[in-house]
Image (tube, grey):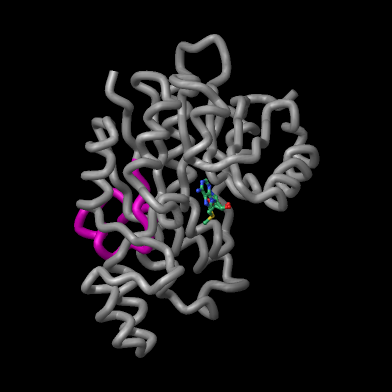
Amino acid sequence: MATRVGGMSAPGRSPSAARTAVVWEALHRLLQVQSRGRATELRVLDVGGGTGGFAVRVAELGHRVTVVEPSPDALAILDRRSEETGVADRVTGMQGDIATMPGLVGSGAVDVVLCHGVLEVVDDPAAALAAVTEVLRPEGTLSLLVAQRHAAVVVRAMAGHLDQARDLLEGHRPEGSPRRFTAEETSALLTEAGFVDATLHAVRVFSDLVPSSLVDGEPRAATALADLERAVSERPEYLTLAAQIHALATRRP
Ligand SMILES: C[S@@+](CC[C@H](N)C(=O)[O-])C[C@H]1O[C@@H](n2cnc3c(N)ncnc32)[C@H](O)[C@@H]1O
């Protein structure tokens, strides 16, 4: 059985750790607050959880995690990862998507939903969030991670793809490319789906801009980058520069 870990896991010093540290640390704090005073572990659902990068870490904290994921290959890797990490008894993979999720897990069945990198690829983000609302218990929490549009405009322009930058700026989305959201659109979607008390964090403000040659194999630089990401994550003025927005929101009672 996995043991509950008291302290926050070290974010690590790799460039990829700098990209996920802000999300992981906010999620870790949320799980600590939610599980306080509860006799049992939390029921966590990771929709579109992929190969289980977050799900396995949440299970390592002692919670029970269900991953609803359309890709059988990703689910196979999730199973292997759960076995290798010793949390297979706490992680359940189910093949499905966000639309079929309520039928798989039931209404009001979970305490926390992770929906990371999924609204970008679904046909109807509002319907997808409505499905999330359905599976959460009243006052349960959503951890939502979405791509942020303005940062993508800057990145395209800096790479010299000026027409693409202009298209993105105007809100056009080339066929097959992921959807991107502004902070205002993210907040509006959450409100419409019945969420309150949303807090938005700026994620990957600098990680995608700092040349990897400056941080690869440079642990001190990687740590400094993660610290900088942490420092700007709660500053609203940086939301427009962030590659991703992380939102924590509560389902209305
Ligand atoms: C960008 S990946 C994110 C994976 C993981 N959540 C993470 O943060 O590492 C998007 C995931 O969403 C899954 N996905 C695609 N369409 C989906 C849908 N309609 N419902 C649920 N998941 C979907 C993909 O298979 C993939 O695993």
Q: Which residues are magenta?
A: 229-247
Query: Quadrant of residue 141 in the image?
Result: top left
Asked if residue 57 can be seen in this view, the reply is no
Quarter of the figure that contains the C terminus: top left
Asked if residue 86 can be seen in this view, the reply is yes
Look at the picture and state if 64 lies above or below 165: above
Taking depth in this image into account, of 71 and 223 the one nearest to the observer is 71
Taking depth in this image into account, of 104 and 180 the one nearest to the observer is 104
Q: Is residue 32 left or right of residue 236?
A: right
Residue 97 x, y percent position in the rendering = 54, 42
Quarter of the figure that contains the N terminus: top right
Taking depth in this image into account, of 56 and 232 the one nearest to the observer is 56
Residue 163 x, y percent position in the rendering = 30, 86
Q: Is residue 114 left or right of residue 168?
A: right
Residue 28 x, y percent position in the rendering = 48, 36
Q: Is residue 230 left or right of residue 16?
A: left
For the point 41% across and 34% down, the residue is 131
For the point 52% across and 65% down, the residue is 222
For the point 25% across and 57% down, the residue is 182
For the point 46% across and 29% down, the residue is 112
Look at the picture and state if 43 lies above or below 99: above
Query: Does the magenta run of residues contain 242?
Result: yes
Look at the picture and state if 97 lies above or below 88: below
Look at the picture and state if 211 lies above or below 238: below
Query: Does the magenta run of residues contain 30?
Result: no
Residue lying farthest to the bottom in this orientation: 160
